[in-house]
Amino acid sequence: MKLLKIRDNSRQKKEAFSHIGKLTDRIADKTLEQLEREGVFLFPEAVEDAEDMTEDQMILQSINDGYRTGNAMGFLGWGDERLIIRSRFCGGGEDYFFQYLLDRVLDFPNIVDMETDADQDNRLFQFLLFLFPRYLKVAMRKGPFKQYIRRQYNDGNVKGTIDVARHIKRNTPFTGKIAYHQREFSFDNSLMELVRHTVEFIRGKHYGNRLLVKVKDEVKRVVDATPGYAPCDRQKIIEQNKRNAVRHAYFREYLALQRLCLLILQRQKHQIGSGSRQIYGVLFDGAWLWEEYVNLLIRDIFYHPSNKSGEGAQRLFHRNAGLIYPDFISRDSEKRIIADAKYKPMGNIGNRDYLQVLAYMFRFDAKTGYYLYPEAEGAGDLNLWMNRGSTYEANVVPRGDISVIKHGLQIPADAQSYSEFAVCMRQRERAFVRAFT
């Protein structure tokens, strides 16, 4: 297996990709939308759901004699070639930071060693399995999927269209039965059967029960809705779902679940990419992971509006003009604070970042703003006081009442194991939150 490890938001010489040239040719200068159509699984569920990943963003963008990566982290492969995109904040050793974000935000079991060169395909396959509970829970919020299906009967209670050829074949000589079919609105359809097959497959893994216990109620509803489940029908169910993707916009969560189930069940037999010439992989939006992780740390102190769900929408102006979604608004209305999560180093926070937070501060009468970012270099907080006056009058001086603070969460750089990294991160998290208490 040919393997290359690079970092997100970095530049690499093209010659570094020479030993994975076939894979590089198939992903370079392709947008996330194109890669998603070709089989790469993106998280959040689709490109249009990600606030920080756009459809025209590229995994590898050609710039002169090199390639530049974006915010996406994860695995990509083609044939026997593999590309791992790690976090740029992982320091010089193992990428425990990315693994820790997945653990905290998505509650992944800590059994994935992403830096083990051997058997990377199994690591990628485990990522798909670990995503299943989340996708199932989100989809099942709308209840079990129900659709019209065509069922065949052969009895004396005719309620549908008679199948003449089948009737002659099965009921000659006539025995009082009629062969017919009818359309029924049923929960026991090909999509729910696909989900059931995926559930049963995961149950067969040694960590399956641990994974599914998080969604035990949803699993029970799937099992109850699929009395026609038969293990031997798996391939038939897969083919039916490949031909009939969920199309209705209301059930978009089921489309994501359907894609994930197909990836799991199609790959489990021959492992990912084996004998295939198709691009495959799992990519995560690093900026989204960081923002959701920060929310876990400070949600008792801050509101967290969500652009994706529309929850907590704010307006700049009277009569619903100027829709905005600040990342974080403090719950303390007397000493209001606006905070913005940035998945970038301190030195890269500037220009439009400043304008955005200052606009939010002005809107909410906040005297203090924060940029919350991962700090890998060990730098302390940087407090920027807002100026007053004009260079034309030569009277520019800092105000003493309005400031923005770059407040970093210190990322351990010298941990010898994931458990040591996690313990250290818990300590750093407490110090990070202490600034707001």
Image (spheres, rainbow, N blue to C red):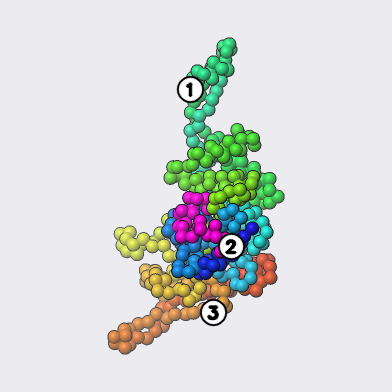
Residue 319 picture location, percent across and down: 30, 59
- The answer to whether any part of residue 336 appears in the image is no
Which secondary structure dominates the residues rendered in magenta?
helix
Q: Sort mark 1 into few (<14), some (14-19) or many (20+) by Cα contacts within 10 Å.
A: some
Query: Left of 258 or right of it: where is 55?
Result: left
- Identify residue for label 2: 19
Q: Residue at x 54, y 67 (%)?
A: 15
Identify the residue shown where x is 51% and y is 58%. Answer: 25
Q: CA distance from mark 2 to mark 3?
A: 40 Å
Q: Which quarter of the figure has residue 327? A: bottom left
**First reached walking from the N terminus: tag 2 or tag 1:** 2
Amino acid on which disc 3 is placed: Gly
Could you tell me the amino acid type at mark 2?
A: His
Q: Is residue 26 magenta?
A: yes
Q: Residue furthest right?
A: 206
Q: According to the image, label 1 marks what residue?
A: 160
Q: Which residues are magenta?
A: 18-40
- Could you say where residue 128 lies in the image, as x and y percent from the top left? 59, 52
The numbered disc on residue 380 is: 3
